[in-house]
Image: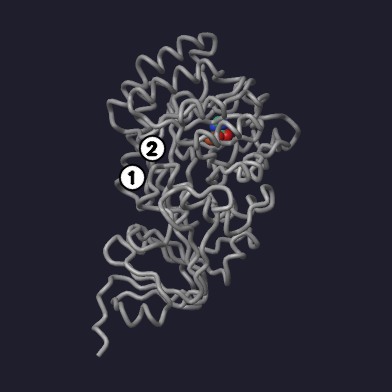
Amino acid sequence: MPNAPQSADLLITGVAEVVSPCGTSALGGSALESKIQSGHAVAVRGREIVAVAPEDQLLEEWSAEQVIDGAGGILVPGFVDSHTHPIFFGTREEEFEMRVAGRSYVEISRAGGGILSSIRGVREASREELLGRLLQRLDRFLELGTTTIEAKTGYGLTTADELKCLEVLAEANRLHDVELVPTFLGAHDFPPEYRERHEEYVTLLIEEMLPQVAESGLAEYCDIFTESHVFGLDDSRKVMERGAELGLGVRMHVDQLTSLGGAELAAELGAASADHLECVTPTGIEALASAGVIPVLCPLVPLFLRQDEEAPAREMITAGLAPALATDFNPGSCYVQSMPEVLTWAALRYGMSASEALAAATLNAACSLGRGDRLGSIEVGKQADLALLDLPGYRHLTYEFGRNPVRVVVKGGEVVYERYDETTS
Ligand code: NIG
Ligand code: FE
């Protein structure tokens, strides 16, 4: 007599493939890949995945009241977007048109646009207004299959406005199904009142903002825009060392527009991530590889900025690095929330295969956020964060773009999004 099936809360059956990277550590070099399990089904109990097995076997061993029919699609881990700036008020489409007409991001920024125009919006907005906008954006992330985002502040740039943004992020984390990992980006730019007093702003960051942010417990990471027109290497070192000393993890925007050597600094500081890297040098790549820093790559940004340089992703993978992929969603340099879109551009611009790109957009991203033990893969013991996509096979992850393939999203074992489909209702 076969044993009676064990009870689960949710089964996902009828999928063509369960596609997922494996393990709890970031995958680099030739280990960067996803496992393709054809004809497999998944059982979830509480918040956790309790079985991943060939469907016949799984149905003998597990039963549940709720069963989702995958209808021949593929099941992937919920996307982890490891670099976003989601808390802003007001958009910057006129700057996009200026770039389309030939002006550069730095020119627009020097003329008082760029980050500065978003600062005005955030300072004037109330908490309720900021929260309202943020929650709408989180709905959009979820319907695009993203279940966890890293979320940066950086458009307040006073102690009070930055804390206001961190509090709004914490409130959104309580209210919404998308999991937010908060990062303090007070060093995003010099605010207007410190335009001629850069040293004083660095002092404010070190002596007031970072200590108050650390004390509040509202941020896990600190970040900085290390670039020749904003924070140079010496300032970046001082600010990030102070953040680390106060117990914050370090993420850095480096070598995005110029080859300043930010990657080498991120390596020296043992950063959790070095982000952008469009202009990183071979020495920078070597430094990141020796220090085991995760490069967070945002392939839609140079496209949106009309920048020629592209992060040398293939060279990084050959050097053994374990890249993560992200949108960099923000109102200035990338007004895009779609990880499915990022996967296609990672293939087209970086030469990443579908299997590599998915691993970078899930497990590696989760590892860069210190969550690789819990998130980023479909394996027994991991949290059930899943996206069911109406794609017939994993290669379509990169091959198809321009439409949203997400049908169902599960976060922590709960179905949190289901696409309304007229043909099935
Ligand atoms: O990641 N590089 C700095 N920060 C953003 C741009 C922010 C903005 O323009 O508002 C980025 O590209
Ligand atoms: Fe960014």
Left or right for 219, reference 235: left
Q: Establish if 63 lies above or below 134.
A: below
Left or right for 97, reference 404: right
| Residue 355, image quadrant | bottom right
- Between disc 2 and disc 1, the foreground one is 2
What secondary structure is found at the residue carrying circle 1?
A: helix
For label 2, the residue is 182
For label 1, the residue is 173
The residue depicted at 32 percent of the width and 74 percent of the height is: 66
Residue 48 x %, y %:
31, 61
Q: Answer few, some or many: residues within 10 Å of disc 1's Cα (few below 14, many 20 plus, some between 14 and 19).
A: some
Q: Establish if 262 lies above or below 304.
A: above
The residue depicted at 65 percent of the width and 62 percent of the height is: 399
The answer, for residue 140, to whether it is visible in the render is no
The residue depicted at 53 percent of the width and 69 percent of the height is: 390
| Residue 52, image quadrant | bottom left
Farthest residue to the bottom: give it.
Answer: 1
| Quadrant showing the C terminus | bottom left
Between marks 2 and 1, how big is the CA–CA gap? 9 Å
Q: Answer few, some or many: residues within 10 Å of disc 2's Cα (few below 14, many 20 plus, some between 14 and 19).
A: many
Residue 193 x %, y %:
48, 13
The residue depicted at 40 percent of the width and 49 percent of the height is: 372
| Quadrant showing the N terminus | bottom left
Q: Nearer the viewer, residue 371 or 146?
A: 371
Q: Looking at the image, tell me whether mark 2 or mark 1 is earlier in sequence order.
A: 1
